[in-house]
Amino acid sequence: MGHAAAETSSFMTDFLLQSGGVAIIDGGLATELERYGADLNDPLWSAKCLLTSPHLIRAVHLDYLEAGADIIITASYQATIQGFEAKGFSSDESESLLRKSMEIACEARDIYHDRCREGSPDSNDDGRVLKQRPILVAASIGSYGAYLADGSEYSGNYGHAITLENLKDFHRRRVQILAESGADLIAFETVPNKVEAQAYVELLEEEDIKIPAWLSFNSKDGINVVSGDSLFDCASIAESCKNVVAVGINCTPPRFIHGLILSIKKVTTKPILIYPNSGESYDGKRKEWVQNTGISDKDFVSYVNKWCGIGAALVGGCCRTTPNTIRAIYRTLSSRSPAPSS
Ligand code: MET
Ligand SMILES: [Zn+2]
């Protein structure tokens, strides 16, 4: 095992120790940008704000840090070189836009640390969490299906024409750029099938990527990943890769999470991460979320304690969760008694 590999293997466990056992991931980015008034009806979705309103992205990152998040995820989920080129940007410009997602998140972290120095040590009167702590910036990589912008990341069905090699080539340059952008780790999010998980771990090894990564799958039945591929197989692929420092589930209704954690536990010794959506249903035809079909922040939080009880080590929220959700998670985790040291 080389030096870098040895460092990778303790990266997440060290971070979790510093975070008090459980680390908090941020909440929905795209849906929060929409709440701020951004129009994301575009093939680039949230990545459109890299062009039109970077200040909003920064504001949302800051909101999540002030709600208590220990990890913020960049706006690069649907930012791809191919997607930017389709809009007429050159490849250099497209690469800069990817780096920009990282710069915005790092700026937010810097501003936050300044506010912590100026503010009160723990929590302000206004409920902001201003507490110096290690904060990670995770570079988001959404799936090929997200780039297609037709809901394929929720079907995982790319057709027979798309091979493992195609997927590796599709993601290669973006992975390289984000890995060298100053990110603390790569967040492969909403991975819908086995072949894309395989593509990611092979890329990490072939390109000798120097920073750690997590792999996070989505499910719509609580048993398999959305394509119908077995979660057991998908999590095993993640488990086999030394660069992968956590494996889990995102953008999946809360009611499915308990069972999914138990399935993942059977395959992995790596920390398990969980950031469900609000449970609201999505109307694919109208391209909008159906309001109030999900659960309240209070119910979300009562789940969080159970998830941590069965082994989730990183918890946050995905689409339609807000800084209020994250603040509620922060409060419930802070009130937990510290794990007995063994
Ligand atoms: C469709 S899942 C989207 C994940 C991304 N991190 C976001 O919150 O916007
Ligand atoms: Zn989501």
Image: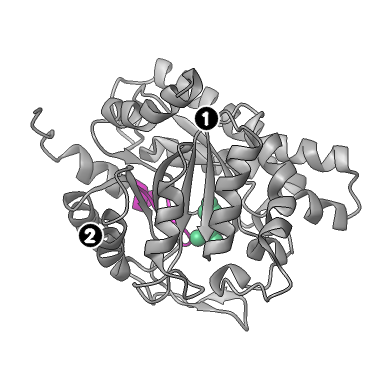
Residue type, numbered disc 2 = Tyr
What residue occupies the far front of the structure in this picture? 1
- Rounded to the nearest angstrom, the CA distance separating label 2 from label 1 is 28 Å
Residue 324 magenta-highlighted = yes
Residue at image position (59%, 40%) is 204
Residue at image position (31%, 69%) is 256
Whether residue 92 is visible here, answered yes or no, is yes
Q: Residues within 10 Å of mark 1 (few under 14, many from 20)?
A: many
Q: Which of 89 and 205 is in front in this view?
A: 205
Q: Which of 162 and 249 is in front in this view?
A: 162
Whether residue 36 is visible here, answered yes or no, is no
120 above or below 193?
above
Q: Earlier in the sequence, mark 2 or mark 1?
A: 1
Q: Mark 1 points at which residue?
A: 184
Q: What is the x, y in percent for residue 236?
A: 40, 55
Range covered by the magenta-colored residues: 315-326
Mark in front: 2 vs 1: 1
What residue occupies the far top of the structure in this picture? 117
Residue type, numbered disc 1 = Asp
Using the rendered view, name the quadrant where residue 115 is placed: top left
Residue 303 is marked as 2
Q: How crowded is mark 2: few (under 14 residues within 10 Å), some or many (20 or more)?
A: some
> Which SS class for mark 1?
loop
> Which SS class for mark 2?
helix
Marks 2 and 1: CB-CB under 8 Å? no
Using the rendered view, name the quadrant where residue 242 is placed: top left
Image side of residue 108 versus residue 167, left or right: left
- Which part of the image, by quadrant, shows the C terminus? top left
Residue at image position (87%, 56%) is 87
Residue 112 magenta-highlighted = no
Q: What is the x, y in percent for residue 182?
A: 61, 26
